[in-house]
Amino acid sequence: MDEQSGGAPATPTIADVARLAGVSKGAVSLALNDKPGVSEETRQRIREAAETLNWRPSIHARAMLRSRAFAVGLVLARDPRHLALDPFFAGFLGGVQTVLADSNSVLVLQVVGQGEEAEAEGYRRLARERRIDGAFLLDVRTDDRRPALLRELGLAAVAVGPDGADYDGTPFVGVRDGDGIRDAVEHLAGLGHRRIAFVEGAPAYLHSASRLAAWRDAMRAHGLPAGPHAAGHFTGEGGAAATRLLLERRPTAIVYASDLMAIAGMSVAREAGLDVPADLSLTGFDDNPEAAHLHPPLTTVRQDPVAVGAAAAELLMARIDGRRVTPVSPSPRLIVRGSTAAPPAAR
Amino acid sequence: MDEQSGGAPATPTIADVARLAGVSKGAVSLALNDKPGVSEETRQRIREAAETLNWRPSIHARAMLRSRAFAVGLVLARDPRHLALDPFFAGFLGGVQTVLADSNSVLVLQVVGQGEEAEAEGYRRLARERRIDGAFLLDVRTDDRRPALLRELGLAAVAVGPDGADYDGTPFVGVRDGDGIRDAVEHLAGLGHRRIAFVEGAPAYLHSASRLAAWRDAMRAHGLPAGPHAAGHFTGEGGAAATRLLLERRPTAIVYASDLMAIAGMSVAREAGLDVPADLSLTGFDDNPEAAHLHPPLTTVRQDPVAVGAAAAELLMARIDGRRVTPVSPSPRLIVRGSTAAPPAAR
DNA sequence: CTGAAAGCGCTAACAA
DNA sequence: TTGTTAGCGCTTTCAG
C-alpha cells in the first residue's frame, strides 16, 4: 500500500544494515555478535548502521537456526484468587525479569486452572512449539512429576523450594522458609512463650512441609514440647478453622505459615474474647501489604522474593547455556510488630 | 552425534510427517491448516502421521512468513510489592489465558521497575524483536502515551480501564468501577448515612479518577453534599494518612477505592477510639482474600477480573486478526459484610 | 579479513 | 487435486 513512503521498510532486516554499512550480511552478523573475523573499524561502522536503523535481529530467525527460543516459561496451576494473595510471586517475577533482560530472553506466563494435568499440558505445549528453552517450577509438591516431565521434554528446569531439595537432578533455588519459622519461634520463646501452636499450609507442598518441620525443630531446640498444629491450606477459611481448633488447646502463641491465615486467625481469636497480643501472640509469613496496617500490626516473616527470582533466573539461564553456577538462597527476615508480646503472667 | 539412535529425530519437522504420510511438505501444510487442495482421504492420512509423530508446527518458522509472533505482551511498570496486593491482576491473567489457548498464542509478561520510560522500552523491545503481535495496557494514566507508542510500533492494543474511554482509537475493555462505587454509596445512603467521605487512589490513573467521579455523582444523585475526600495512593500508608485527615471532618462513613486502604483506615479508626461499624462504616474495593476475614469483615466491591481478562483477550485477538467484535464490560458487585451499619443515632 | 551461499521449518505461489 | 519451489531473516560454513 504505502510502500513508497520514502526510506527503509518499517522493520529493517539485516540486509538493510549491511547495505547501509556497505558490507555483507555475514559481516553484520559477526560484528554484532562479537565474533572474530571483522576488523574493529568495520565493526564500529556496522554498529552505527544498526543503531541508525534501530535494528534488532528477529528472534524467530535466530530461533530457527540455533533451536533456541530465547524465552523461558512459567506455568502456574493455581486458583487465580489464590495467586493474588501471594506477594512472593510478584516479587519473584520482578527478580526474574532483571536477569532475563540481560540474556535477551523473555518470560512466557501461563496461568492454567488447577490440576496437575492442566499444568503438565501447559509445559508440553510450550515445549512442543519450541516456545521456551527452560522453565521455572513453583509450588513444588512432595511427589512432583514435573521434574521428570521437563527432562523428558528436553527443557532446562529450576525449581523454587526449600533449600537443598533435589528432584531428579533438577536444581533448587532455596527459599529458607525454615529459617523464618525458626526465628519466629525463637522470638516467641524469648518472650517467655512455651505453648506455641502452628498452623501449617497445605501438607502436599514442599514449602509447607518444610515450615512445619522447622517449627518442630525449633520447638525441640528450645526444649519445648511440640504443641498442637493444624492445616490451614493457605486460605482464610482454613486459617480460621485451624485457629478455632487450636484455641481449645489454650496456646499462648500461634505461628502461621502465611499472613492470610494469621489474619483470619486474629479475627477468630478476637471473637473468642481474646486480646492480641495480651492473651495470644500471633505471627504470620509473607509480610503482605496489609500486615503492617492491621490492628495490631502483624509480626511476620518477610522473604526477599526479588532475590529469589533473580537467583532462579540466573541459574536457569546458566543451565540453558551450559554454564555452571552455584545457587544462592537468600534468607528471610522476621519483622517484629505488635501482634506478639509476653504471654499472660497468669500461666 | 547420536543420530542413529534408531527412529525419528527428537523434534519432528514437517518433512518427517510428509515422509511418513507419503506426500510432500506442501500437502501437509495444506492438510493441517484446513485449506482446500487436499483430498479428504489424504488429509486424514496426514493427520494420522502428524499425530503419530506428535508433531506441532514450529512457531518460529510460522512467525517468519506470516510475520506473526503468535504471542501478546503485557508490560507492567509497577513496584513488585504493589503488584501483589491486586487480586484483579491475577484473575485478569487467568481470564486472558483461556482465550489465548484457543488462539494458539501465549502471553509474554514483562515486569519492569517503575517509570514510564522503562515501560515504553519494554514494549519497544518486544516489538522490535517481533516477539508479540499485540499488547494489553493496564493502569492507564490520564495522559498516557502508550496508545500512541503502540500504534507507532505497529502493535495491536487493548486497554483495560473505565468503560467507554478511548485514546487514539485504542479500544477499552471497560471495568465498571464506577458502578461499584455507586452501589457502595447507595448502600450507605440507604442505611441513613449522609456524611460519606471518600479515599481515592492515585489521581493520575484513569481507574482512580473514575471512582472518584462515581462517588461524586452518586452523592449528588442522593441529594447529599459531596463530602471530603483525600488521596491514599492505593497504599496502606496512604490510606491511613487519608483516613486521619478525613476523620477530622467527622464522617459517618468512608468509601475507599481499595481494600488495602480500607484495612489501614480501619486500624486508624480503631486507634482513634471509634468502633466499626457502630461509629463509622467502611467500604473497600477489590475483595482481597483478607477482606472476608477481618474483624469486622469488610464490605467491599468485587469485580470479575477473569471476565475482564477474557474480554480483553478476545478483543485483542480480534484486532490482530482484523476481526470485529463488540467489547463487553462486566459489572462489579457489592459484597455487604460487617463493616457497614446504620450511622450512630446521635448524629 | 571479507563476501557468497546454504539452510533452519514452514507457507504460498506455482507448475504438473 | 497434487508435488515442487522459492523464499521469510538470520547464522555459519566455505572460498576468495
Image (cartoon, coloured by chain):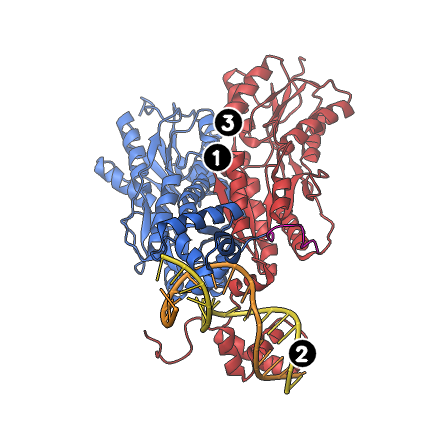
Chain colours: A blue, B red, C yellow, D orange
* Residue A48 in the image, given as x and y percentages of width and height: 46, 46
* Residue A90 in the image, given as x and y percentages of width and height: 46, 41
| Distance between the alpha carbons at the discs numbered 3 and 1 | 14 Å
Range covered by the magenta-colored residues: A1-10
The answer to whether dots 2 and 3 both sit on one chain is yes
Residue B236 circle label: 3
Label 2 is placed on what type of residue?
Answer: Gly
**Disc 2 chain ID:** B
User: Going from the N terminus, do you reach mark 2 or mark 1 first?
Assistant: 2
User: Going from the N terminus, do you reach mark 2 or mark 3 first?
Assistant: 2
Tell me if residue B12 can be seen. yes
| Distance between the alpha carbons at the discs numbered 2 and 3 | 63 Å
Q: Quadrant of residue B245?
A: top right
Does B279 sit left or right of A20 as displayed?
A: right
**Disc 1 chain ID:** B
| Distance between the alpha carbons at the discs numbered 2 and 1 | 53 Å
- Reading the image, the residue beneath label 1 is B79
Label 1 sits on a secondary structure element that is loop
Label 1 is placed on what type of residue?
Answer: Asp
Residue B37 circle label: 2
User: Going from the N terminus, do you reach mark 3 or mark 1 first?
Assistant: 1
Label 3 is placed on what type of residue?
Answer: Gly
Label 3 sits on a secondary structure element that is helix
Q: Is residue B248 above or below residue B131?
A: above
